[in-house]
Image: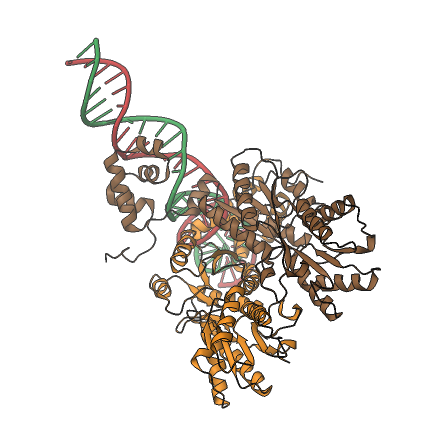
Chain colours: A brown, B orange, C green, D red
Amino acid sequence: MEGTTAGDRTVTLKDLADELGIHPSTVSRILHSDAEVARGAASVATAERVRELARKRGYSPDPQAAGLRTRRTRLMGVIVPRLSDLVLATMYEGIDEAAAALGYSTFVMNSRDDPEEQRRRTDTMLARRVDGLIIGDAHLDGGLLQELTARKVPFVLVNRRVPGYPSATCDDVLGGELVADHLWSKGHRNVAVIAGEPYASTAIDRTDGFVDRWRSLGGKVPPKAVVWSRFDTAGGREAAEDILTHCHPQPTALFAVNDFAAIGAMGALRSHGLTVGVDVAVVGFNDTSLAAELPIPLSSVRSPMLDIGRTAVQLLKRVLDGKMVEPVRLEPSLCVRESSA
Amino acid sequence: MEGTTAGDRTVTLKDLADELGIHPSTVSRILHSDAEVARGAASVATAERVRELARKRGYSPDPQAAGLRTRRTRLMGVIVPRLSDLVLATMYEGIDEAAAALGYSTFVMNSRDDPEEQRRRTDTMLARRVDGLIIGDAHLDGGLLQELTARKVPFVLVNRRVPGYPSATCDDVLGGELVADHLWSKGHRNVAVIAGEPYASTAIDRTDGFVDRWRSLGGKVPPKAVVWSRFDTAGGREAAEDILTHCHPQPTALFAVNDFAAIGAMGALRSHGLTVGVDVAVVGFNDTSLAAELPIPLSSVRSPMLDIGRTAVQLLKRVLDGKMVEPVRLEPSLCVRESSA
DNA sequence: CCCGGTTACCCAATCGATTGTGTAAGGCGG
DNA sequence: CCGCCTTACACAATCGATTGGGTAACCGGG
């Protein structure tokens, strides 16, 4: 029940040093250097006394001061379109966890997928002197990425990939293929795709994976059967309406590249008096926690979102250590449920 | 097309000062002080030259250095149970936006509602020297809050409240009352509540608001009709199963204090062959973007999540400015949809 | 011409940790 | 008993911005 700290303010290296009658630099080496240096800096006995006192006084180093000197903040900046998107939020949890394990903290910001906002956010991150960036809202045209490379800012992409840059993503092409195989084997021959935003690799890859596999199985995908849309529920609903009014013959199966779009589509189908899973099969993507729990459980491609986040952190760490890194694609799997059974 | 910067490293105050042949302190006052001080520091002409050069060189002050001196980081720490919870993610968006407007950046961490983790996260935040905390995972018993108060850490609560501490929340009691009024007026007389986690004020207040109003309308709420549960879909499903097996007579209406729990309940009802909105009414809480888009649109109490987040930031700012603040409760409204019409 | 008051700056200490470079004291071999 | 090598530290500069004092030059009034 000792008074943790007298009551004043935070303890500094100098405080510890003064109290022990030794020099701050010695304390610093003991507490913050790796074994080698620390051993050279003081006797074992002194080192122990220092560590003991640090614990008792609740010493915690000031990252401002350390960062000022070392020019490193142990901060990773994370940019996502919006955290209220469950997919990104989950990846961020993986990121946060993995970063903490490496002694880094993370900084998130929402860009709302707006190029101008992306630029502003990156700038504030850099102004905060983050050591590196994890970018979750990369657009395929990616002028910003070129610029960052030119400015030698260390970064990796997460969720979406852009050729030529390091990234941690789901193998979205494979995901699309899994869906094609599944729907084909269920006997569907008329299908449509709710394809997402064309600037996102997730949308492109999933759609391409599906369409290419479908064709190689002998199926047809008329242009009108691929509808680009927003990733949210409303977007999915609109896309489904579009498909229902313009596609002849009407598809018996829908592949939405995102669970939320799939949910919106399910709503639209129902409004048209169609029963999901009976009249029309629906498959989503990401297997968010909702999919399994919906009134009509939704088939979905499970992507390892947490692992993708963790992987992004590992990649960025390697970049920060000056190593070369290759893009990583994690394997998805298909969860078949009532909506397409 | 001028070379933005020679190519070296970041520009410092001293660089600017040297180039203009004046003292760094003068530059500092011109760029970072408010009009008064700045005017006293240099002539209008000099000030203009400084600002001009700062712009040209892309100067951005080093927050590490500034913070070291001023003992402030312009950082707000935000702790939430989990960002993959849409409700907290949305509030965080409001927080992030409002903080940015005040020149603050935010730091989020997930505590998974685990007391030990809460403590650890708070500690890392404080180690990072955040100026204040926004706590979104407060437990009603709240030993941690007492401790923070004792340590004079500036903080406010968001989403959940704890008596005696400043907070920005929805008026959850009112929310519960709205639901009671609605269901009563629809003629329901047997109801059950999926009440959420008993350590969260949101759960308690919404449940109390509902139950108290229900009784004052002349209704009965047997103890078995209030089931505590997790806030997620699976929790809602289990609670609904519980209610369907143990409540006699079976309720004709369910109030779930959270949309996700409501969705889980809808799934359970369906498994029991009951049609939501016809056999059993369901009402959720928060009016997350999903509610309106579900196959059977969900009635829900709309809580102003973005505004709650923004308000929390305003409150914390006032606390940081040394002012006293009172808890704020923002008014919810009921959105009636097919699930209870 | 002297004096008080502006104007427009400069000086230097400071925040807390890091790190390259000393340097006394003690031990040991010769 | 001397010189060299460890051992165990101490010194001081540094990172970039902030801020409480100066102070020289100039202006106007008396």
Residue A127 in view of the camera: no
Residue B107 placement (x, y as % from top left): 50, 55
Q: Quadrant of residue B263?
A: bottom right
**In which quarter of the view is residue A103 placed?**
top left
Residue located farthest toward the bottom when viewing the structure as drawn: B218
Measuring from the top left, give residue A134's x and y in whole percent.
57, 46
Residue A201: horizontal and vertical position, in percent? 69, 47
Residue A147 pos. (x, y %): 66, 41
Q: What is the number of callouts on the image?
A: 0
Query: On the rendered image, what quadrant is the C terminus of chain B found in?
Result: bottom right
Which of these two is toward me, A287 or B52? A287
**Residue nearest the observer in this picture, B275 or B96:** B275
Instruction: Determine whether A71 is above or below B228 in the image.
Output: above
B328 displayed left or right of A218: left
Q: Eyeballing the image, is A69 above or below A109?
A: above
**Residue B28 visible within the image:** yes
Left or right: B230 as drawn, with respect to A43: right
The image quarter in which residue A112 lies: bottom right
Relative to A51, say whether A252 is above or below. below
- The residue under the point 23% across, 58% down is A1
Relative to B211, is D6 above or below? Answer: above
* Of B84 and B96, the residue lying toward us: B84
The N terminus of chain B, quarter of image: top right
Report the side of A260 relative to C10 (left or right): right
